[in-house]
Amino acid sequence: MKIPGLGCLKGCLFTFLILFVGAWLIWELTPLQEWIGTTKGFFAQIGDIINQVSDFISSIGGSGSGSGSGN
């Protein structure tokens, strides 16, 4: 596949696709779900992790904004 100007972008997207498919196959074909102790599917677990990370980041951003005032 020869697309001029998309060398790095194409490589990055292809690598991301390979990693995503590999993670999904590992999740579905190994006993990883049982080891972690979850009954969620791959996409539900990824969504849950994204929500937890965004909540953590917003709690870090929210806690530091009011602590600098001495009044």
Image: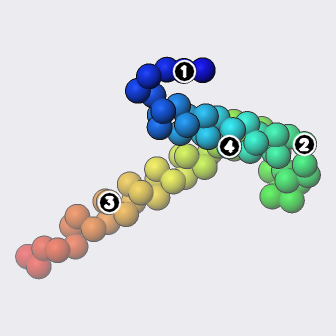
- According to the picture, the residue beneath numbered tag 3 turns out to be 61
Which residue occupies 38% across, 54% down?
Answer: 58
- Give the left or right position of residue 10, taking residue 40 as reference: left
Res. 58 mark: none
Q: What element does badge 1 sit on? A: loop
The alpha-carbon separation of the residues under discs 4 and 2 comes to: 15 Å
Q: CA distance from mark 4 to mark 3?
A: 30 Å
Residue position marked by numbered label 4 in the rendering: 19
Q: Secondary structure at mark 4?
A: helix
* 26 shown above or below 4: below
> How far apart are labels 4 and 1 at the CA level?
22 Å
Callout in the foreground (1, 3): 1
Nearest to viewer (mark 2 / mark 1): 1
Residue 23 is left or right of residue 28, and the answer is left
The amino acid type found where label 3 is placed reads Gly
Q: Which residue is mark 2?
A: 29
Tell me which label, 4 or 3, sits earlier in the chain.
Answer: 4
Disc 4 vs disc 2: Cβ atoms closer than 8 Å?
A: no
Please name the residue shown 61% across and 34% down the image. Answer: 14
- The residue labelled by disc 1 is 2
* Nearer to me, 30 or 7: 7
Q: Earlier in the sequence, mark 4 or mark 2?
A: 4
Q: Is residue 9 above or below residue 45?
A: above
9 sits to left or right of 43: left
Q: Residues within 10 Å of mark 2 (few under 14, many from 20)?
A: few
Marks 1 and 3, the one that precedes in the sequence: 1
Q: In the picture, which quadrant includes the N terminus?
A: top right
Q: Please tell me whether mark 2 sits on a helix, a strand or a loop.
A: helix
